[in-house]
Image (cartoon, grey):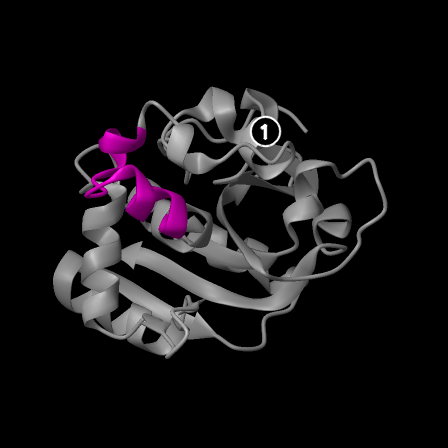
Amino acid sequence: MSCPDCRVPVHTQFASPELVGAIVEGGLDPATDPGWARSGAASPAEYARWAGHLCGMTCLRMALGADAPSLFALRDGALGYGAYTEDAAGEIRGLVYDPFAVYVREKHGLDATVHRRLEAAEIPDLLDAGRSVMASVHYAIRRPEQPATGRGGHLVLLTSRTPDGTGVHFHNPSGTSAQTRAASLPLTEFERFFAGRGVSLRAA
């Protein structure tokens, strides 16, 4: 995993990048993140409850570029379109792709296409066409040297092919280091974690 496409900003779904590893692998309470207010959350408690669910909003924030709204401003917009839901017990569900795509088109001017079935081999053509791809992968993609323990459940933003054409650059909202937040993998390795679905985006 090495130097990725640097044209797209790199953001994490937790406000302090240096704490991502401690939060996602070490059990650190996100409410103790001193940077929580930068996320746009109303309180440490709201931040702690939601940040782990906002990989999709972080991907959108990266795709929107330097002038993107805050993470929780994007969350608020997505909630308004039903891209996230909360059940009677307060459990957060989402990202729901179809309302998310409508939200992105109507509020942020991006062309968004939902791919319910997407082969890994189709991704390079989307990237070559100038699209970025929010791809559903397993969070273990941050440690590709280890066996894949599943597929899906987390979103990363694919930004371009690697120079040799055989791999993809991607930005991982829950990467635990600079190298795993902005990374690349051969497409055959990426496929081990990929659930075969996602959303592609392009400026309209």
Q: Which secondary structure type mostly characterizes the magenta part of the structure?
A: helix
Give, as a single range, the part of the protein colored magenta: 36-50
**Residue behind mark 1:** 21
35 in the magenta segment: no
> Could you tell me which residue is drawn at 40 percent across and 73 percent down?
96
> Mark 1: which amino acid?
Gly
- Closer to the camera, 88 or 133? 88
Q: Is residue 40 visible?
A: yes
Q: Quadrant of residue 154?
A: bottom right
> Could you tell me which residue is drawn at 75 percent across and 59 percent down?
150
Looking at the rendered structure, the secondary structure element under dot 1 is helix
Q: Is residue 45 above or below residue 76?
A: above
Q: Is residue 32 above or below residue 187?
A: above
41 in the magenta segment: yes
Circle 1 residues within 10 Å: few <14, some 14–19, many ≥20: some
Position in image of residue 91 (x %, y %)? 43, 68
